[in-house]
Image (cartoon, rainbow, N blue to C red):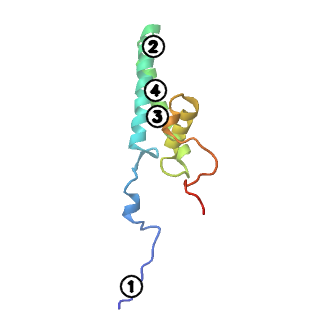
Amino acid sequence: MSNFQYTRSVEHEPVATRVNHQPASLLGITSSELGFLMMVAAIVFVVIVIGGFFVGLSFFSPLLGLLIGAGLVVFGAGRLRAVKRNRPDRYYMHRMWYFLAKHVPGVAGEIVMRSGPWSTGRDSK
C-alpha cells in the first residue's frame, strides 16, 4: 500500500469544471460578449457617419463615430463586468430575458413568470 494521500487544492482545479466556460478575452468579458458590443458599436458608428453627412460634418463624423464606438465598447465592457461580478454563469442573460418578458409583449411565453410554491402534481397520501 502506498502512502499517497489525495488533497484537493484550489490552485489545481480540475479541468472538467472549466470546460463549458469561455475565457475572458478583453477587459474581463468573453469573446461572444465582445462581439455583441462590437456589433452595437458598429451600428452606432454607421448611424453617426450617415447622420454627419446629412448635417454637413462629413470630415468629423467618421472620427466622432469611431471615438464614440470605442467609448461604447469600453463603457459596455465595464458595465457588463459589473453586472457579472459575483453572479452565477449566464446571470445577465437571464436578467435580460426577464426584463424583456416584463416589458415587451409576446416574449412572456419564452420564460416562466411565476411566483409561489410549486407542486409535483402528485397527491400526497
Which residue, given by chain and number where applicable, does mark 2 sit on? 51
Secondary structure type for disc 1? loop
How far apart are the two marked residues, 1 and 4, measured between alpha carbons? 59 Å
Amino acid type of the residue that numbered disc 3 sits on in the rendered structure: Val
Q: Are marks 4 and 3 in contact (CB under 8 Å)?
A: no
Q: Residue furthest front?
A: 125
Q: Residue furthest left?
A: 1
How far apart are the two marked residues, 3 and 2, measured between alpha carbons? 20 Å
- Residue 56: quadrant of the picture: top left
Residue name at image x 55 percent, y 38 percent: 98
Amino acid type of the residue that numbered disc 4 sits on in the rendered structure: Leu
How far apart are the two marked residues, 4 and 2, measured between alpha carbons? 15 Å
Which residue, given by chain and number where applicable, does mark 3 sit on? 73
Give the x, y percent position of residue 21.
40, 52
Which residue, given by chain and number where applicable, does mark 4 sit on? 67
How far apart are the two marked residues, 4 and 3, measured between alpha carbons? 10 Å
